[in-house]
Image (tube, helix red, strand yellow):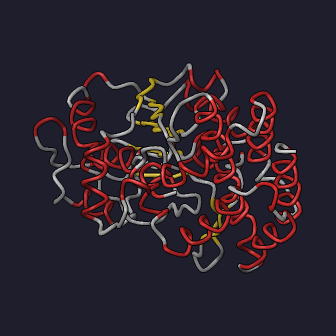
Amino acid sequence: MADDIDVPDARRAWTALPPWLEAKAGETLAQRERWPHAWLIDGPRGIGKRALALEFARALLCESPRPGFRACGACPGCAWVAAGQHPDLRRVEPVEFDDEGNATPVDLIKIDAIRRLGEWSQITSHRQGAKVAVIVPAERMNAAAANALLKTLEEPPPGTFLLLVAHQSGRLPATVVSRCRRLPVPLPAREEALRWLAGQGVSAPETLLAQAGGAPLAALERSDPALQAERAEWLEALARPPALAPVALAARIDLGGRDDRRERLAAALDWLIAWTADLARVGAGGRPQLNPDHEEALRTIAGQVARISLFRYYRQLLGQRALLSHPLQPRLVAEALLADYRALFT
């Protein structure tokens, strides 16, 4: 999503740094002389971590850096990074390219991509300067790929920097994490995020930011009117458990094209997870954090479900989301989950 989009293109141009990360970039680059050879840039999805990694790469590859080691934006190195064509910048993402350069997202970063990265790291720099590799999302490396990366992490060629971007660093092997210096990236301040969203022309930024858990770039992606209309259909159905028709609601997964069904299931799972979490919050006497626009409906039904059953269902949803990269029948998965949701209230 957004900065951490699941349809990455390793050849696309550099992405401008969001304003809430300017201070983080400046503080980190000011310590450039004490940098490790590998960073683990860690934080929630949708806050600009990829853009931050690329800002670091641009600074490392800049041929006329400004004070504080910030990129000048005008030298040949900066121009090539901006165009996505710098020979000393390698981006490794879960995407494959056909002969015409068209990108297709894949589930995992596999060992071949990491082996090619290792071979690339041994080649002399084209510009007689640094070499930078950005791996994002790093937790999408399969086990073989992560093991293959260890050799480069343990014996990095001089002047080579590895920037690993992770949304869920807990899914990375401890052997990889221990060989990187962690750079945590928190959510921006709420008011700053709201100002930025308003500047992007987003309506109802408060509601969208809540849906995205405070992540502005993820909120911007959720501003698509069609996506919001679909969310409304699902939440209105979830608000009336006895009348919920699992087969009919799950059939909406098939309304898009065949290739869109897994993405539509992912969105539905996110709505179910957020709804269930808010039900638990309201049931415990709190207020909904992710669906504040449906607070009244949540309060109406929160007392009708046992807390332990709701917790088990929430764990079930998380487990199902972890299986999205595996072969599945999206509509049938949604049907089963909706039937289990309705059963919570009987």
Is residue 129 visible to the viewer in this orientation of the structure? no
Task: Locate residue 25 relative to residue 335 in the image: left or right.
Answer: left
Find residue 251 and report its horizontal and vertical position in percent. Answer: 81, 72
Task: Locate residue 237 relative to residue 9 in the image: left or right.
Answer: right
Residue ID at (42%, 44%): 214
The C terminus - image quarter: top right
Residue ID at (24%, 54%): 195
Find residue 32 and report its horizontal and vertical position in percent. Answer: 26, 29
Give the mark count. Answer: 0
Q: Is residue 262 above or below residue 278?
A: below
Find residue 146 and report its horizontal and vertical position in percent. Answer: 67, 35
Q: Give 277 or 343, whichever is nearer the viewer.
A: 343
Q: Is residue 70 above or below residue 240?
A: above
Q: Give 257 or 80, whichever is nearer the viewer.
A: 257
Q: Residue furthest left?
A: 67
Find residue 52 and report its horizontal and vertical position in percent. Answer: 35, 45
Q: Give 51 or 339, whichever is nearer the viewer.
A: 339
Q: Is residue 43 above or below residue 117?
A: above
Is residue 131 visible to the viewer in this orientation of the structure? yes
